[in-house]
Amino acid sequence: MIRALLWDVDGTLAETERDGHLVAFNRAFETAGVPWRWSAAHYGRLLEVAGGYERLLHELKHRDAAPAGSAAREGLARQLHRLKNGFYEDIVRAGELPLRAGVPELLAECSAAGVPMAIATTTTPSNVAALLGHHLGGDWRGRFAAVVTAAEAPRKKPDPQVYELALAALGVGAREAAAIEDAPAGVYACRRAGVPVIVAHSHYFPDAVAGARAAGPSLGSGAGWRPAAAVPGTRIGLEQIRRWCA
Ligand code: XBP
């Protein structure tokens, strides 16, 4: 029986990669006087590298215009990442990153039913605080029994660390929780932690991922899911998630 729900953040709660991080990275490049910008397609490929700082370092290693020494590259990546996270917060506060369809309803359903929830993301904690503070208000933390981010789980997905820490904080076994994810790395992390996972595809991750209990286009619709949603209703709710995970 599923007793707790674990939430990924980027791509799952909101389309943060396409509409948030990518835009913010490009603003950071401009501000720092870096002579390149990332296209939406190039960023999609870069998402194979987990972590914004790591993504920047990867890019710097492959750009002729980047500093030659590793210490200089790391310094520039740190500066750009700090700038990017500041711009990301600006974008959130400007209301440009709405929660995805079905997310507010499922959050409210869990709270009303007394089902504890955790955030399980390897993004920077300030990004999580900005997004959830904007949408859920100043007491957003109180809605979650645990919040695990890159600060607590430095080994990024697909490493299972973030899910293992979330389960430990909640005090539930892996099979007593369900995770909501969008990306293959998140699904692998869940599988390695033994957590059943439901995938709501996002802009950058539209394809099926092996090992998910169910996958579909949006928590806001019962249509297009595999296996098909069986609980009547216009969105994916707890009862449906429990059936998929049973
Ligand atoms: C998403 C990530 C993050 C974000 C950028 O992690 O890989 O790196 O793309 O955020 P998750 P940072 O799927 O666990 O939410 O720049 O803070 O790393």
Image: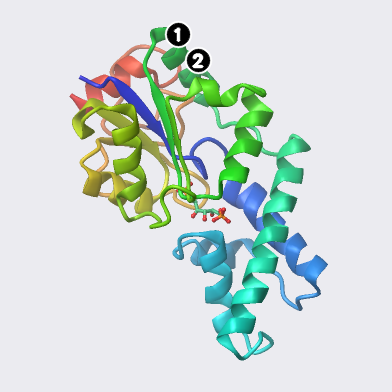
**For the residue labelled by badge 2, is the local secondary structure a helix, a strand or a loop?**
helix
Answer with left or right where residue 163 lies relative to residue 195.
right
- Quarter in which the N terminus is drawn: top left
The picture places residue 173, in percent across and down from the top left corner, at: 21, 30
User: What residue is drawn where x is 45% and y is 60%?
Assistant: 50
Residue 208 visible within the image: no
Circle 1 residues within 10 Å: few <14, some 14–19, many ≥20: few
User: What residue is drawn where x is 46% and y is 65%?
Assistant: 49
Q: Check disc 2 and report the residue beneath it.
A: 108
Answer with left or right where residue 87 lies relative to residue 69.
right
- What amino acid is found at the position of numbered circle 1 in the picture? Ala
The picture places residue 54, in percent across and down from the top left corner, at: 51, 67
Label 1 to label 2: alpha-carbon separation? 6 Å
Q: Quadrant of residue 132?
A: top right
Answer with left or right where residue 128 lies relative to residue 156.
right
The picture places residue 25, in percent across and down from the top left corner, at: 68, 61
Residue nearest the viewer, comparing 200 with 150 = 150
Residue 144 visible within the image: yes
Answer with left or right where residue 148 lies relative to residue 139.
left
**For the residue labelled by badge 1, is the local secondary structure a helix, a strand or a loop?**
helix
Residue nearest the viewer, comparing 218 with 118 = 118
Residues at circles 1 and 2 in contact by the CB criterion of under 8 Å: yes
Q: Check disc 1 and report the residue beneath it.
A: 112
Q: Is mark 2 within 8 Å of ligand 1?
A: no
In the image, is residue 70 above or below residue 140? below
- Quarter in which the C terminus is drawn: top left
- Counting labels gives 2
Circle 2 residues within 10 Å: few <14, some 14–19, many ≥20: few
The colour scheme is: rainbow
Farthest residue, direction top: 112
User: What residue is drawn where x is 34% and y is 55%?
Assistant: 158
User: What residue is drawn where x is 39% and y is 18%?
Assistant: 237
